[in-house]
Amino acid sequence: MPAMPTPSSSTSPPTPGQASRFLAQATFGPTPAEIDRVVSMGYARWVDEQLAMPPSQTHFDWLVSMGRNTEAYKGNGINEPLDATLWRKFISAPDQLRTRAAFAFSEIFVVNVLSISASWPMFGAAAFMDTLAAHSLGNFRDMLEGVTHSVAMGCMLTYRGSRKEDPKTGRSPDENYAREVMQLFTIGLYELNPDGTLKLRDGKAVETYTNDDVRGLAKVFTGWDLAGQETDPEFQRRPMALNPANHSMSEKRFLGKVIPPGTGGVESLRIALDTLCAHPNVGPFIGTQLIQRLVTSNPSPAYVGRVAAVFADNGKGRRGDLGAVLRAILLDPEARQADPASPTWGKVREPILRFAAWARAFGATSRNGQWAMPDTTDSTIRLGESPLRAPSVFNFFRPRFTPPNTPIAQQGMVAPEFQITDETSVAGYLNFVAIYVDRGWEDVQTDYAAEAALAHDTHALVRRIVLLLAGDAFSLATARVIADAVAEIPEPRKLDRVRAAIMLVAATPEYLVQK
């Protein structure tokens, strides 16, 4: 059975259990081969190899290669191929750090495919995820510009086609993106110290912006719309273009910045994005959320401060280097030497990550190349969460969510993923995991060959499953109970033993809480 870990020095090679836990943070889940690589290479070399790895095939290009760029897929509501390509990359892409980071950013810069009002919406969602992937190891300023120019985001936050103010009719520019680009994408609601704690004035939090700032910034986003006709899906991955006739040429005031009257749309946008990205809140605000998405829900101020410092300067004088930020998050002493037994450390493993981790751990792959997967939003029979289908711009769950009337709330802590956790979703997850562990899903299948070879020794079987799913963050006692229970299944029924063991491990709190 796996032994409980002790913190290792930064120079010691990681154990298989430590490597597995690291990969649960850095990827969509450990595989036997990647565990061996991390043990051999060490954490830092593995991260550097991922940072240097070229991007894998984009979602957009895969959809085209599968012949989905036809009139049959022009409308909304026919999005199964989008699910297929998203899960395809989650499970099989070699550039796992880039892919995992892009998913993390998709829960900060939120787009729902059903909100994309232009034709071929699934291509818009695919292009949006490709934009996040293209910049997730690059520069934050470039990412914010790509997001701002995205047709998908223009539809999601309704500034696509926003027109300048008209005093005669009382028309005002659309304010949605101006508000959310500050509140959710860059600076947040309140001024922060470099370590992510609130700045206080007379004992009260200080707001970062006012309604006047929103109104002034909204003028910047007027005049942007589709670049070209909706004759084929290609327009979905072209940046939105400026229609100067619809852009506000009046003075634009926001966050202490003044863009003079007569400034055109392209220059106004450049100034606005530069201003937002230079704000001191961005590093701790984005850094905290990335730590939450990858490592732990309640990072210490010191951890946030170290990550924010790398955001401010990657060591080479560059601000917003996301590759350096991710490296700092994953290699930080708090991430690597945390005690998995601590009740305040870790995060709830969100449902999307649970399914992807099962597929990666046990070698599930598409038998026919179609990667057929459903919308998994239903919380009664599926995961209660489906990629690029968050119900609002606030994601499936908010980063500061605290389950009320719980010990978590009493300690002033947060647990974002608990916002989609209730009696229904818990039962729904168990129902879904029972299905896919038993027989996969559609053409996404595995034969459990390596596990079946251990089925005669249920303790060895459970050790392997625990290593692949939970790393070293699993108790000896729980593992023994599962192994003994599985041993009640007659030995000749090897696959039944394997499936029961996986199901039981996947249902434990020690797996569901990522340590």
Image (tube, rainbow, N blue to C red):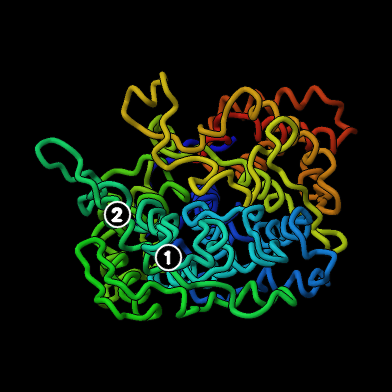
Left or right of 417 in this view: 353: right
Q: Quadrant of residue 471?
A: top right
Q: Quadrant of the N terminus?
A: top right
Q: Is residue 45 visible?
A: no
Q: Position of residue 156 (x, y in %)?
A: 55, 56
Q: Quadrant of residue 185?
A: bottom left
Q: Position of residue 167 (x, y in %)?
A: 36, 63
Foreground label between 2 and 1: 2
Residue for point 85% across, 37% down: 494
Name above or below for residue 105 compared with residue 139: above
Mark carried by residue 205: none
Mark 1 residue crowding within 10 angstroms, few (<14) / some (14–19) / many (20+) = some
Pick whichever of labels 2 and 1 is earlier in the sequence: 1
Residue for point 20% across, 40% down: 205
Q: Quadrant of residue 271?
A: bottom left
Name above or below for residue 472 compared with residue 489: below
Left or right of 369 in this view: 400: left
The amino acid type found where label 1 is placed reads Ala
Q: Nearer the viewer, residue 289 or 299?
A: 289
Which residue carries the number 2 mark?
A: 284
Which residue carries the number 1 mark?
A: 44
The secondary element bearing badge 2 is classed as helix
